[in-house]
Image (cartoon, rainbow, N blue to C red):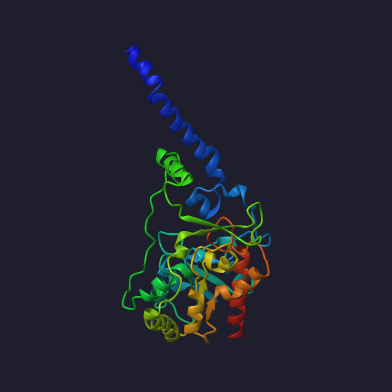
Amino acid sequence: MKRFLIKLSYTVLPLWLFAVGLVVYVNVYARPRMKGDFGRLGYILTQQLYDEISDNEVKDTLYRNVCDTSELRKCRADVLTIGDSFFNESAWGYQNCLVKAGLSVVNYLTPGGTHNPEPLQLAFQLLDKTDGTHIPVVVVESVERDLIHRVLNLDTLCDTIPLMPVQSKRDHWSLLEAKNYVMLKTGYEDNPVKHCTLSRPMFTGKGNRDLYFYFQDLDCFGIADSVKSQFKTNLELLFRKAQQRNIRLFFLVCPDKYDVYQDFIVGNPYPRKTVNEDLRALFPDRRDLIIGKEIIAPYIKNGEPDIYMGYDTHWSYKAARLAADTLANLIWADH
């Protein structure tokens, strides 16, 4: 027995101590320094790279969230917003900026989730739950990387509200989490967060020339000619449905982070992305189609820092405010 314990002490015990130490390191030291989407997804110590930026003018959420269609039927507001995670930034969200512009805003959240997985499909269904006498303006948003899929898969016959899939909670104090950290850090697994170097500073903090972006930004680089006709037809169906309900609909496309910074990547190894340009070519005269890239690109070109969050796939309050100002001007112009 004694011999067995001695053998155990220099074989299994060191491995066990290493595993325990790794779990403690990841959770006590590394995890608190993993800010934003990219910190959590890519196990990147983003706090060391980027300073925290904030909108000092707004601290509270000024709009109302609704996640029940029966409650929506009772709502009276100037604007209803429906979107994905770009539209659910609370005090940083563009809805707050609309409220500051004098508009009352209701934001619809999918039951069971914090954002809407299929905002176009959801909007098509929700247009039957309200009309222009209750809420005269509806703003629908989609991030660029999911735009083509969402438009092409719009089901005009479906009457079921899409729900956010239930996601299991991660046990951060597990050996699996520590293993994932090691696998990504050593390169044995592909990191979902891509990294490139920019030709000039675009963010505040130490990593001001480091561009981190989500790998799915590279899934599609343009709208294929073979689907352009169906794409245009489906999107026009959404606008027509709103018109039938006496609702003015605006559709906002939030560009991918890779897209808006691609011209500034040193030795860019990836193809050029043209989804936004292809979209505008399909709808050259629609003022109610708001392409976020057209709004924020001039500011990025002029060197405005932190239009997107350095450690996140989402744009910052600066970009949200620019989009909201454009939208508010359009809404008030049509009043």
Quadrant holding the C terminus:
bottom right
Please state the horizontal and vertical placement of residue 304, each as a whole percent of the image. Answer: 67, 66
Q: Which is nearer the eye, 105 or 239?
A: 239
| Res. 67 visible in picture | no
Please state the horizontal and vertical placement of residue 3, each as a whole percent of the image. Answer: 34, 13
Report which quarter residue 171 is drawn in: top left
Please state the horizontal and vertical placement of residue 131, each as a whole percent of the image. Answer: 45, 80
Please state the horizontal and vertical placement of residue 199, each as a whole percent of the image. Answer: 63, 62
Residue at left 56%, top 55%? 311
Judge left or right: residue 179 versus residue 296: left
Question: Of all residues shown, which one is farthest toward the front?
Answer: 267
Quadrant holding the N terminus:
top left
The total of numbered circles placed on residues is: 0
Residue at left 38%, top 84%? 229
| Res. 153 visible in picture | yes
Q: Is residue 92 above or below residue 331?
A: above
Residue at left 49%, top 51%? 42
Judge left or right: residue 299 versus residue 30: right
Q: Which is nearer the eye, 83 or 34?
A: 34
Report which quarter residue 312 is drawn in: bottom right
Question: Of all residues shown, which one is farthest toward the top?
Answer: 2
